[in-house]
Image (spheres, rainbow, N blue to C red):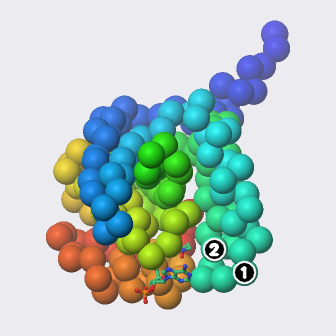
Amino acid sequence: MPVDLESILRPIDNPMPPFPAKHMTIASGEEMTIRQVTRDEIPDILPHVAPLMYVERDFYDVVAARVYAELMSYYTHRIQDAYVLIAQIDGELCAVVNGRMVSGDVGMSLHTLAMRRGLRIGAHAFAAKMEYHMDIMGQKEVLIVAESPIGFRRWMIASTSRTSWAVCRRGH
Ligand SMILES: CC(C)(COP(=O)(O)OP(=O)(O)OC[C@H]1O[C@@H](n2cnc3c(N)ncnc32)[C@H](O)[C@@H]1OP(=O)(O)O)[C@@H](O)C(=O)NCCC(=O)NCCS
């Protein structure tokens, strides 16, 4: 009898509530939407992340490489309980953020990558991710890590700490 290897390799996702799309006016006066994407949208996002793997500035290269791998993992069902949110202005992709559920009470922020700079788009997208964990999923704690000085300033210093966000070593 043939063994269905895929059923062994593929993690079984736990149910997660959908992220309701958010709309906001950013500093430029433009309207930005932050919404959840489905697996079948991932191939459209990858070509926008790939060039950033070669940007040797502000840690875009390492963060983009990790985001690319995580998007592929999500697309190919090689990561459990993960989600991807994107920010768009006039349909143009301007940020990708992702994370995962660790348990019912604990979430993990994976990465934040902003494609347009100077408008705090990344900070808005990060905040949406925290809202997803705290307000929509009702989690008590989100594990976050900063990989770049800008990220550190945004997440650890500028963000208002609502609950017991735990800063963790990269363990994923
Ligand atoms: C971290 C990140 C998500 C923040 O995005 P953001 O909130 O939209 O931030 P902004 O682009 O508005 O501003 C970032 C900084 O770049 C500066 N900046 C703005 N426009 C710029 C430009 N065209 N070129 C270079 N720097 C620019 C800003 O002055 C700001 O500096 P500050 O932190 O001293 O205020 C984004 O910088 C990014 O994707 N970085 C690469 C990946 C990364 O580090 N991710 C986070 C890992 S923890």
Q: Position of residue 159 (x, y in %)?
A: 27, 77
Among the 4 quarters of the image, the one containing residue 25: bottom left
Q: Residues within 10 Å of mark 2 (few under 14, many from 20)?
A: many
Q: Is mark 1 within 8 Å of ligand 1?
A: no
Q: Residue furthest right?
A: 2
Q: Which residue is mark 1?
A: 56
The residue under the point 50% across, 57% down is 94
The amino acid beneath tag 2 is Tyr
Q: Which mark is residue 171?
A: none
Q: Residue furthest front?
A: 29
The N terminus appears in which quarter of the rendering? top right
User: Is residue 87 something that shows in the picture?
Assistant: yes
Callout 1 amino acid:
Glu
The residue identified by callout 2 is 60
User: The C terminus appears in which quarter of the rendering?
Assistant: bottom right
Q: Is mark 2 within 8 Å of ligand 1?
A: yes
Q: Residue at x 74, y 20 (%)?
A: 4
Check if mark 1's residue and mark 2's residue have beta carbons within 8 Å: yes
